[in-house]
Amino acid sequence: MDPSVQVEDLKWTPVHTLLFIAFSIGTTVEAYIYSLSYIATSWVAMPRTLLGLLAVWPPLWLLLGGAVSGPLADWIGRKKHFLSHLAYMLLVPLDLFSALHT
């Protein structure tokens, strides 16, 4: 059977709902992060070079992160990479929080 026909015949399940919600939240957070630098430029007067840097900073890190993260995930395994990334995303804010409150 053709895979495109199989996809069309799939029923919507609770797993699809959870995936949709997770994707929607992730897309919303990413859009907020990308737009934050543009919003912040209207708070104070700043040089055009800084405005340009703020405009390219998020996509630049997204590009560099994908270039490093993809091969690393292929090398150590996607599940290990995912779990280590989650641990990193948990520990770094805790470390910053503790540094600010000492």
Image: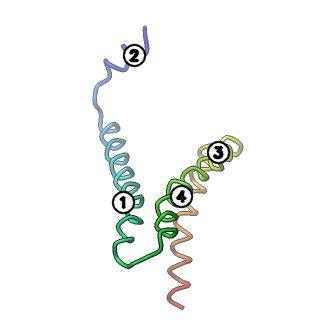
In front of the other: label 1 or label 2?
Answer: 1
| Residue named by callout 4 | 86
The answer to which quarter of the image holds residue 3 is top left
Q: Dot 3: within a 10 Å radius of its alpha carbon, few (fewer than 14), some, or many (20 or more) residues?
A: some
| Residue named by callout 3 | 73
Mark nearer the N terminus (3 vs 4): 3
Image: 27 above or below 52: above
Q: CA distance from mark 3 to mark 4?
A: 13 Å
| Residue named by callout 2 | 4
Amino acid carrying mark 2 in the image: Ser
Amino acid carrying mark 4 in the image: Leu
**Residue at coordinates 33% horizontally, 44% vertically from top-left?**
18
* Relative side of 95 to 36, left or right: right
| Residue named by callout 1 | 32
Amino acid carrying mark 1 in the image: Tyr
Mark nearer the N terminus (4 vs 1): 1
- Front position in the image: 85 or 51: 51
In front of the other: label 4 or label 1?
Answer: 1
The secondary structure type at the circle numbered 3 is helix
Q: CA distance from mark 2 to mark 3?
A: 28 Å
In front of the other: label 4 or label 2?
Answer: 2
* Relative side of 49 to 36, left or right: right
Q: Residue furthest bottom?
A: 102
Mark nearer the N terminus (4 vs 2): 2
